[in-house]
Image (cartoon, rainbow, N blue to C red):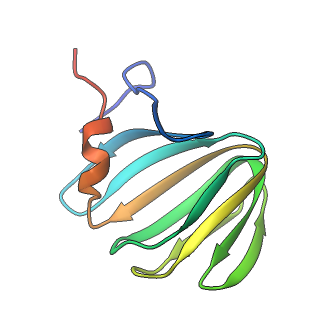
Amino acid sequence: MITTNDQAVWHDLIPGIRVSTLVHGEKTLMARFELQEKSFLPMHSHPHEQTGYLVSGRMTMTIGGVEHRFGPGDSWCIAPGVEHGAVVHETALAIEVFSPVREDYMPYLPSRR
């Protein structure tokens, strides 16, 4: 599967946070997230391993009860079932890979023309 930038589509998840599911395979799914300044991602957990890279912006993530400040170029890996959330200090762009595939993000795949 290949997605070009002009095929990718943004979808609002919660106020201030939107997702663009880019590609998936049998075992992984990659998505990009735009997080607006002063938005927050409530604490949550899911059965997927989540590996992320912060392209731009600044945020504080709480992962397993520990706060981590992230800036451009920083990355993380969150084990399945670990509670996590974020507070966004500066509008951010993050790329994340989930394993197994997040079925709830499949509807956000680009439409193929």
Q: Percent position (x, y) of residue 69?
A: 79, 68
Which of the two residues, 31 or 87, is positioned nearer the viewer here? 87
Residue in view at x 39 percent, y 79 percent: 80
Badge count: 0
Seen in the picture, residue 59 relative to 63 is either above or below; the reply is above
Quadrant of the rendered structure where residue 107 is?
A: top left
Residue in view at x 26 percent, y 59 percent: 101
Q: Percent position (x, y) of residue 91?
A: 75, 40
Left or right: residue 54 compared with residue 96: right
Q: Quadrant of the C terminus?
A: top left
Residue in view at x 49 percent, y 55 percent: 96
Seen in the picture, residue 62 relative to 15 is either above or below; the reply is below
Quadrant of the rendered structure where residue 75 is?
A: bottom right
Residue in view at x 42 percent, y 58 percent: 97
Q: Quadrant of the N terminus?
A: top left
Q: Percent position (x, y) of residue 30?
A: 39, 50
Left or right: residue 46 compared with residue 57: left
Q: Residue furthest left?
A: 26
Q: Percent position (x, y) of residue 102?
A: 29, 58
Q: Residue furthest bottom?
A: 65
